[in-house]
Amino acid sequence: MSINQIQQPEANIELETKAWKTRRKGEISIFDPRIIRRAIPDSFKKLDPRVQLKNPVMFVVEVGSTITTIEFIRLLFAQPSGAFTADQLVAERWFVLAVAIWLWFTVVFANFAEAMAEGRGKAQADTLRKARSTTMARRLNSREHDSATTLVSAPELRKGDYVLVEAGDVIPGDGEVVEGVASVDESAITGESAPVIRESGGDRSAVTGGTRVLSDWIVVQITANPGETFLDRMIALVEGAKRQKTPNEIALNILIASLTIIFVLVVVTLEPFAIYSGQAVSVTTLIALLVCLIPTTIGGLLSAIGIAGMDRMVQRNVLAMSGRAVEAAGDVDVLLLDKTGTITIGNRMATRFVPLKGVEEREVAHAAMLSSLSDETPEGRSIVVLARERYGFTDEIDPALTFVPFSATTRMSGVDRLNGSNEPIQSVRKGAGESIERFVWEQGGETSAELQEIVTSIARVGSTPLVVAETATNGNGKQARVLGVIELKDIVKSGMRERFDQLQRMGIRTIMITGDNPLTAAAIAKEAGVDDFLAQATPETKMQLIKEQQQGGRLVAMTGDGTNDAPALAQADVGVAMNTGTQAAKEAANMVDLDSNPTKLIEVVEVGKQLLITRGALTTFSIANDVAKYFAIIPAAFAVTYPQLNALNIMGLATPHSAVLSAVIFNALVIIALIPLALRGIKYRPIGAGPLLRRNLLIYGLGGIIVPFIGIKLIDLILVALHLTL
Amino acid sequence: MPVTLNSVVQVVIFMVVLLLLTKPMGLYLTTVFEGRKNWLTPALRPVEHLFYKLCGIDPEEEHKWTGYVIAMLVFSLVGMLLLYLFERTQQWLPFNPQGLSNVEQGLAFNTSASFTTNTNWQFYTGETTMSYLTQMAGLAFHNFVSAATGIVLAVALIRGLTRRSAQTLGNFWVDLTRCTLYVLLPLSIIGALFYVSQGMIQNFNAYVTVHTLDGVTQTIAMGPVASQEFIKNLGTNGGGFFNANSAHPFENPNALTNLIIMLSVLILPAGLFYMFGKMVKDTRQGWVLWAASAILLVVGMSVLLVAEQTGNPMIAHAGVNQSVTSTQVGGNMEGKEVRFGITDSAMFNTISTAASCGCVNSFIDSYTPLGGLVPLANIGLGEIVFGGVGSGLYGMLMFAIIAVFIAGLMVGRTPEYLGKKIERKEIMMAALALLILPASILGFTAVASVLPQGVASISNAGPHGLSEMLYAYTSANGNNGSAMAGLLGSPYWNWTMGMAMLIGRFAFLIPILAFAGSLAQKRVVPAGLGTFPTNGPLFVGLLIGVILIVGALTYFPVYSLGPIVEHLLMQAGKTF
């Protein structure tokens, strides 16, 4: 028994935290050349009008590109006539061709953004497919592991079949371990290379098809038919094959479609106004104006943002069963966190020895250590470690010590030291206050009010008091007395307080769920910094709490793994099931955490918020962009009718043609420029809604107004430098 | 700087008085629409209940949004028909000392639509077209009820925002009765008496013929003016008794009445903002809308003031001194009353077009191009700068929803306003409401600008002619009613503008009530640290930004071809 072992849980947390922050091995970067190579042809395939029809904004651009292209073809066959000289005709042809090309680019760039967003998922799906396709299984004729087997391919297995999986085999399908225990490499699914234990019974019995057994053997009862397995669902999810637009995405689509309709109206009615004013504006210029005005930036990037959001969840090893859940995660108002394993390490640990009057702390520590030497419970181990740490005891288990294990009747454990004739000369017992008191009385000793005080004070701070007593036989005969109390404390995981503070700044309430009594619960809640707690929780009270919160209009998120968590997971707006959890829990939840890390919920919320912020920022940016485009195109469109309108050409663009072209080019390039932002997402800062809004409004609102003025001017300067002003 | 200290002081005084009146008005309105007791209850309660009994209304019964819409539509349609009948039969009815003949079909339709929709566009000259009976029972009736209709719809929308998991939005008939009885009538009675004290006329006499000192005869129109004048402005109606509207000495005798008119135009819209805050249990929410409006109003007044005070450079080039001196007001005085001058005209017309009133004390057709752009833009934005009674509030709230929806995502939550989630249905209705106005304005103007029947009515060529047409349809769709003048009535314009007014009112209202109905059913998400703040200066800025950008994006091209290019041409020495 080493100190290291006991401190392991804490070390694990550090590791886990690291794992979230740093990229795991084998992860594909967003801009991996493989993804780009695949995205380029895809962006042309997506030019199919049936694909574009799903996106009203880009569909309008495609229609505009087509009309402009037709206009170019018409001009190719047109003859100079009247005021329209041959030189002008040539210039007009080049202009229309340039506009047409850049309009097509606009659509292609938007397609490229979407293809890039899908790229990583598709690459991951390919890897997953490999795990699925090649498996052979040994089907057992009965549940017994030694019954006869038949070799079948994995797709032939049906629900209810039993298979034997031995070291080196790939588990052929999702199932429950019904017999045996084995270490399993789940890296194909989770990316985590450390093996996990899977055993029959309890909450660690679920296995996933495609993972590999490393040692020992297990009998697995198959629980999913081919095509419905977790791996199948995961492939579909990461690939985005069945991606549906999420509620907020639909609403945003309606808004940008409405804006598109307004701008179609603005541009369509502009022609009669132009005719009234003296001269019609060319179709090409009108379409250029339209495309520049409709929110192509957000229209082109919207679906990429959504796919990238799902993808970011996958990168964090969380499988969201729907985009709706990712969106809801951003809205979460209340987090329900289980105390054990999430907030606290899970085992109570000895932190202090409290001697009674007249006893030295050292004595208490020594007695406590003796009584725990063979106590294999985490609490017992922690007592030994603490005593050795404090006083450097070196006692080891020796034959003179007889251990008295914990029993339900005595409700205490301890040790007896025997003399040569096997008579106990010293007995040490540790246990709950009442049991030890009874023990001392039975041995003829007395207890004091002081003990009661210490016990109560320890319980009040949420710790568990463990009373230590000894009987010693010396010259005066047998003497029984209480030595002191060991304080066993629920240790809050390191870094939790900061995380809860952060959640508070995000405006999210945290509620700790625990089976402890209210006193203990309150103390731990205070120490961890959670806002509230539910003590003596049962599945029913938990469910009731969720419903109450939802009644008050709040969105609730929770994690769970057991079968009895399933109803609550289903009721919660965001339910994250642990991958190690039972099938029922996984089915009820709308997310599955492959790392089975309950604190992941906080990151899930962040990813949700990031998705929404990215959407909002790019929408704001897109609309703010329009101001500059008006100043570029309106003076250009009416250069002939009203040369005075050149006063509005505040960017000083060279010619009417270069002005229109610069605006169109800017409009297309800005989509490409924003792809990284759309795919990576805008960082969420837990600084409160007000400051966050101010910051983002400044960057994407004000920035959105200013940037295109600079961009369009620069493009115009380049066109002039290249003599492309036509 | 062409603006004088005098102008600045007047604007400041006006804004301060408006600020001081907002809260008391808002509190009173709150008691009326929450059905609570106020100091008029003892006197009016029996009257109110008598109405319900006579009309068979159960005041406890409430409508769903659809029921509310149907009641409103039925009521408006019947009212419109009544007015149409009055106009078409007035020569056989009493109170017609001048023996004015029946109004022709197109004009009667246009006028009925105009007054029913709270527009009060007038394609006629009041003193030579409408009998006293038509004015009082037909037109003034609508001045009351069209205003009340606007207000109660805003109240229904507030209920949608505040109620939780509710199906109903209130009872249209009860709201309408209470609004008219407790708010509009008492204020109008006091106001009319005050106006009479200031020299406004109130009689049923035949017109007076006088022999002037110049030796010519002049007919001076008479009538029950004072009783109509206060509600004309209080209800943001704006339809003048006389053709000259508030430039006529009988409709606006002196500087004091001019001030009272301006205040009476904005008092209800401003009070409704406060009431909104009160009803949503956070008065700051109301003050935010108030502040955004006040800023836009002062900006509008300033632009108009500077443009008019600067005048026309061509006149300056001709050697005429246009600057302010101790003996002259300077600037562009064409079309303005010397009693009011530039400042009071600029303030008056900015206010009248910011709200959906449309009364005028000076003539917009004679303004400088940029001066004329202010009223045009005020109406084009949807009259949300305080806005019409009720319509200002619900129009402004639609902008707030759009602002929350666009920028709200940037705090990392799906958009919510006052704890209600703005989702697919809500954004569809808000977008529809905001889409209808520009669609109708631009559509009608575009058609008119290329149709011979359309351009036949304009009296100026070039960009100014375009502005005249644009102004007419903007005013009709916005239910403002102010005219740029220079546009002659014709059957084409009568019918198309009548339709534009009906679209601007009802096609706009239905989505808003659907929006309210959908919101009422929702739960309220309690506000927290992560909630998008809609009650601070940041939101005021955002709201103004969204209003200006959405407005600018919609109208920039056509304004460029109208007032903006006209201004640039004027600088270059060309006018129309």
Image (spheres, rainbow, N blue to C red):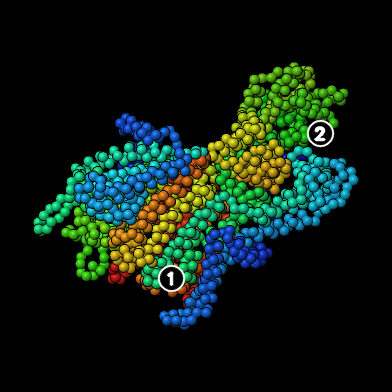
Image location of residue B126, percent across then percent down = 25, 52
Q: Residues within 10 Å of mark 1 (few under 14, many from 20)?
A: many
Residue B282 to residue B345: above or below: above
Which of the image's four quarters has the C terminus of chain B?
A: bottom left
Report which quarter residue A543 is drawn in. Answer: top right
Q: Residues within 10 Å of mark 2 (few under 14, many from 20)?
A: few
Front residue of B295 and A284:
A284
Image location of residue B144, percent across then percent down = 32, 43
Q: Image point 88% across, 47% down: which residue?
A: A149
Q: Are marks 1 and 2 on the same chain?
A: yes
Image location of residue B192, percent across then percent down = 24, 42
In the displayed image of the protein, which residue is found farthest to the front?
B92
How many badges with numbers are in the image? 2
Label 1 vs 2, first from the N-terminus: 1
Camera-nearest label, 1 or 2: 1
Image location of residue A334, percent across then percent down = 57, 40
Which of the image's four quarters has the N terminus of chain B?
A: bottom left
Q: Image point 33% across, 37% down: which residue?
A: B182
Residue behind mark 1: A281
Residue type at numbered disc 2: Ile
* Disc 1 chain ID: A
Q: Image point 27% across, 41% down: which residue?
A: B188
Front residue of B372 and A48:
A48
Residue type at numbered disc 1: Val
Residue A156 to residue A274: above or below: above
Residue A575 in view here: yes
Mark 2, secondary structure of its residue: loop
Of the numbered discs in the image, which one, if any, rests on residue A397?
2
Mark 1, secondary structure of its residue: loop
Q: CA distance from mark 1 to mark 2?
A: 98 Å
Is B15 displayed left or right of A472 in the figure?
left
Is A243 displayed left or right of B380 in the figure?
right
